Amino acid sequence: FLTHNELDTISYTFQAAIVIDVLRATSTIVTALSNGARFVIPVGKIEEAVDIKRIQPDLILSGERNGIKPQGFDLGNSPLEYSEEVVSGKGIILTTSNGTKAIQKAKKIAGNVYIAAFLNISYVVEQLSAYENIAIICAGNESEVSYEDTQLAGFIISKLTECKRYSLSDSSLIALRTWEAIRRPDFSGTHSQKLIELGFGRDVDFCQKIDVFPSVPICKGERIVRNLIK
Ligand code: MLT
């Protein structure tokens, strides 16, 4: 279990990494791909995203800064915007404050990078049970640990350790014990509060739903694509 800031100092590699940004980047990616988007390109900077859109105008330009859709963008970072009618058959460029940066960093430390949310947790865990050596990367919130991300990390660890023995880092143990103490999503952290204040209360409710989408987004080169579970 790592926060994305720790990744800057890590040089060893993992067989697999899972990236978590429950509120809201990874929930948005899972929703978009489950609703038929062809791919998502995660991008760190707004300018980079705009440059890609200039070269490929058919792509949907999307993301947020401070929770809000940047000027000129097609979509924000609310998973509820990514309906089948809007995204089916489309490619998406996504830039967010923390989540898309965490995905880019994860690709440097692991060969297989998966995207997790409460919305697809059990399906992610099924894919991961094949690996011995897994990094769980929580995007967090502007260098702060996120309560919601930590819960999902703990939920994943609790499911993984049901079927196999892993040697857990201290941060993994903290996440596991946090989840064991609540055993259902508790979205009362600061980022939930901020989103509610910004008028995104429906996102906060939606992102708590468990196993809505039987799909596991996986990074393939520059893109994130859907790995459909039958
Ligand atoms: C992020 O990447 O920091 C988040 O997804 C922010 C948000 O809630 O839009």
Image (tube, rainbow, N blue to C red):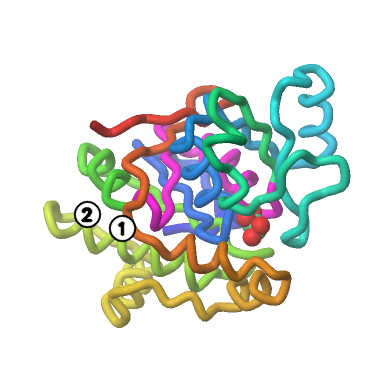
Magenta stretch containing residue 108, yes or no?
yes
Q: Position of residue 88 (x, y in %)?
A: 54, 29
Residue positioned 30% across, 70% down in the render: 176
Report helix, strand or loop for mark 2. Answer: helix
Q: Quadrant of the C terminus?
A: top left
Residue 118's disc is: none
Quarter of the image where the N terminus is located:
bottom left
Q: Is residue 117 magenta?
A: yes
How far apart, in angstroms, are the residues tagged by discs 2 and 1? Answer: 6 Å
Which of the 4 quarters of the picture holds residue 93?
Answer: top right
Could you tell whether 160 is left or right of 144 in the image?
Answer: left
Q: Which residue does the image show at 74% across and 35% down from the upper left? A: 61
Marks 2 and 1: CB-CB under 8 Å?
yes
Which residue is labeled 1 in the image? 156
As rendered, which of 200 and 186 lies closer to the eye?
200
**Quarter containing ligand 1?**
bottom right
